[in-house]
């Protein structure tokens, strides 16, 4: 009788991997799914053996075998953290209510599981994460994991960590001593680093919901990317990198270091990541470009672009910096200005850098970003030195990036004698400096543009005036060399004024004596005498 009751009258193909021969009566008594299937097929089949094919049974043959053990042992099985995930998911799939109840009861004690056991179950969920998520076991593990992380200090594990348990599973790839001696990461980083990107995404989102420190989360993601990118295949590296970038974008901006973001950029530059992912990373970096160092910006240009450095990338960074919708403080703006001036000096010697790209980079910032344009002048000077074949029109366009009023006297003097610059640009610089000088003298109260020099009470000669000028201007002059240059320029302005007065007097005298003018008896004084 027993032999008849346990006859193998059903053939079950599990995911095309393995075939089981089982008893229909025993399985249908525990599995609602099979019971309904057998009831439907009984009227349409005349064969003694039924064939059932499962294409997507979670856990595959191993999980189905555990379910069969439960059925053949009349609803009795030893449930442990090692098999809970398989049993729980197959119970949901096979509609085995009794088995599901057993696993649910076991999950109620998840708070007593060790840290290693939690990680082991999460590792098992990787193969059938959809079923694990729908069955609820994944969420229970995530909740327990976040609770442990939140309740433990950053430097030491909780009471339920691997150190306090004699059981260690295959997912623990590092030694306990390594965790204790490591000072640059939190204790839970190493354990979670063995999980695949799909599970990590759920883990991190659970951490965010659980109010775990965003700073620690960002450090973990950077650690995870660094560890996994050294062992995975390129396709898997791309997936990991995209996951890390997406998760970093969910954190507070201040929690992600600029150095870390550039590290992600270096790794992703060699991978085939999606355009949306690259844009998201560039946006995060660009919004904080003022925190970067020059070395961070010296990213080699992609193959085939021709340039030494990826200038287009820097231009995109600057676009994101100004497109974040906030008013940029002047201190941040000036840090970016100083950074871009240094970058200009690095890329200017590149013979493959096109004029339009150089101009775009030099003019990408507003005028408020720079207190002086000496840096831009030096970069342009270097660029014109390397690109000797440029036309005058191209040179003029490049020089349009200069604000002559923000050039020092030394830079203007150098520009005026610089044969690489168009003559018109040199003249503009000199005119700008003359205007600045007149404005400076006017502010001191010793120069009036309508009446020339205004006599100062007590002055006896022009030499005393010059001394007075120097004394008044010395309030703002800390550099003796700059004061000497300014005095020299003041002398030249005074000489020009005296010359103009002589010319004016001569012209007045000539108008009074037209006959003398027409006879050519006298000539105008030489301007250069």
Image (tube, grey):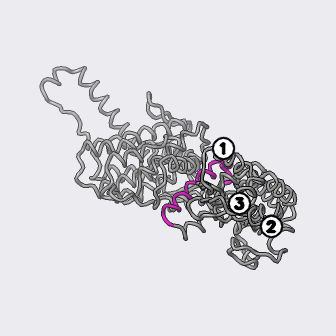
Q: Earlier in the sequence, mark 2 or mark 1?
A: 1
Q: The N terminus is located in which quarter?
A: bottom right
- Residue 398 appears in which quarter of the rendering? top left
Disc 1 and disc 3: Cα gap in Å?
Answer: 17 Å
* Tag of residue 220: none
Disc number lying in front (3 or 2): 3
What secondary structure is found at the residue carrying circle 2? Answer: loop
Percent of width and height locating residue 414: 36, 53
Residue in front for this viewpoint, 475 or 309:
309
- At 65% across and 49% down in the image, what residue appears? 253
What secondary structure is found at the residue carrying circle 1? Answer: helix
Above/below status of 361 relative to 497: below
Span of residues in magenta? 233-255
Q: Is residue 379 visible?
A: yes
Percent of width and height locating residue 30: 77, 54
* Dot 1 alpha-carbon crowd within 10 angstroms: few under 14, some 14 to 19, many 20 or more: few
Q: Is residue 212 visible?
A: no
Circles 3 and 2, Cβ within 8 Å, touching? The answer is no
Residue in front for this viewpoint, 404 or 381:
381
Q: Which residue is mark 3?
A: 23
Magenta stretch: residue 351 in it?
Answer: no
Q: Earlier in the sequence, mark 3 or mark 2?
A: 3
Above/below status of 467 relative to 449: below
Q: Main secondary structure of the magenta part?
A: helix
Q: Which residue is mark 1?
A: 40
Disc 3 and disc 2: Cα gap in Å?
Answer: 26 Å
- At 47% across and 59% down in the image, what residue appears? 271
- Residue 256 appears in which quarter of the rendering? bottom right
- At 45% across and 59% down in the image, what residue appears? 299
Q: The C terminus is located in which quarter?
A: top left
Residue in front for this viewpoint, 416 or 267:
267
* Tag of residue 80: 2
């Amino acid at each position: 009788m027993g032999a008849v009751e346990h006859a193998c009258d059903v053939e079950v193909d599990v995911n095309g991997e393995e075939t089981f021969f089982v008893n229909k009566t025993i399985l249908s008594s525990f599995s609602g799914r099979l019971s309904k299937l057998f009831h439907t097929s009984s009227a349409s089949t005349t064969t003694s053996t039924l064939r059932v094919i499962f294409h997507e049974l979670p856990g595959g043959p191993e999980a189905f075998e555990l379910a069969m053990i439960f059925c053949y042992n009349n609803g009795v099985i030893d449930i442990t953290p090692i098999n809970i995930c398989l049993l729980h998911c197959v119970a949901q799939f096979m509609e085995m209510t009794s088995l599901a109840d057993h696993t649910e009861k076991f999950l109620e004690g998840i708070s007593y599981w060790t840290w290693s056991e939690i990680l082991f179950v999460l590792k098992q969920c990787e193969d059938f994460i959809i079923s694990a998520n729908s069955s609820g076991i994944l969420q229970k593990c995530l909740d327990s994991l976040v609770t442990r992380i939140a309740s433990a200090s950053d430097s030491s594990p909780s009471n339920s960590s691997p150190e306090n348990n004699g059981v260690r599973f295959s997912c623990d790839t590092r030694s306990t001593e390594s965790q204790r001696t490591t000072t640059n990461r939190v204790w839970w980083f190493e354990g979670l680093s063995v999980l695949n990107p799909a599970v990590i995404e759920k883990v991190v989102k659970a951490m965010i919901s659980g109010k775990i420190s965003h700073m620690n989360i960002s450090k973990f993601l950077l650690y995870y990317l660094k560890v996994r990118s050294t062992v995975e295949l390129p396709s898997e590296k791309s997936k990991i990198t995209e996951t890390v970038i997406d998760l970093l974008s969910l954190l507070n901006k201040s929690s992600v270091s600029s150095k870390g973001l550039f590290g992600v950029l270096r790794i992703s530059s060699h991978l085939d990541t999606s355009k949306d992912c690259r844009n998201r990373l560039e946006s995060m970096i660009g919004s904080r470009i003022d925190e970067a160092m020059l070395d961070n910006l010296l990213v080699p240009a992609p193959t085939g672009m021709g340039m030494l450095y990826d200038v287009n990338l820097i231009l995109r960074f600057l676009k994101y910096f100004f497109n974040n919708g906030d008013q940029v403080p002047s201190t941040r703006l000036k840090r970016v200005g100083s950074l871009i001036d240094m970058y200009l000096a690095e890329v200017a010697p590149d013979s493959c850098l096109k004029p339009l790209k150089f101009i775009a980079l030099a003019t990408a910032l507003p005028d408020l970003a720079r207190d002086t344009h000496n840096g831009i002048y030096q970069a342009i000077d270097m660029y014109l030195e390397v690109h000797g074949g440029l036309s005058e029109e191209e040179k003029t366009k490049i020089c349009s990036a200069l604000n002559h009023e923000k050039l020092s006297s030394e830079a203007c003097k150098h520009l005026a004698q610089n044969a690489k610059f168009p003559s018109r640009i040199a003249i503009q610089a000199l005119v700008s400096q003359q205007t600045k000088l007149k404005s400076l003298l006017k502010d001191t109260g010793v120069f009036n543009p309508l009446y020339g020099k205004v006599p100062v009470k007590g002055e006896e000669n022009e030499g005393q005036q010059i001394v007075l000028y120097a004394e008044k201007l010395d309030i703002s002059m800390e550099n003796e060399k700059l004061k000497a240059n300014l005095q020299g320029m003041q002398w030249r302005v005074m000489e020009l004024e005296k010359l103009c007065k002589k010319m004016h007097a001569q012209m007045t005298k000539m108008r009074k004596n037209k006959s003398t003018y027409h006879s050519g008896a006298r000539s105008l004084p030489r301007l250069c005498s």
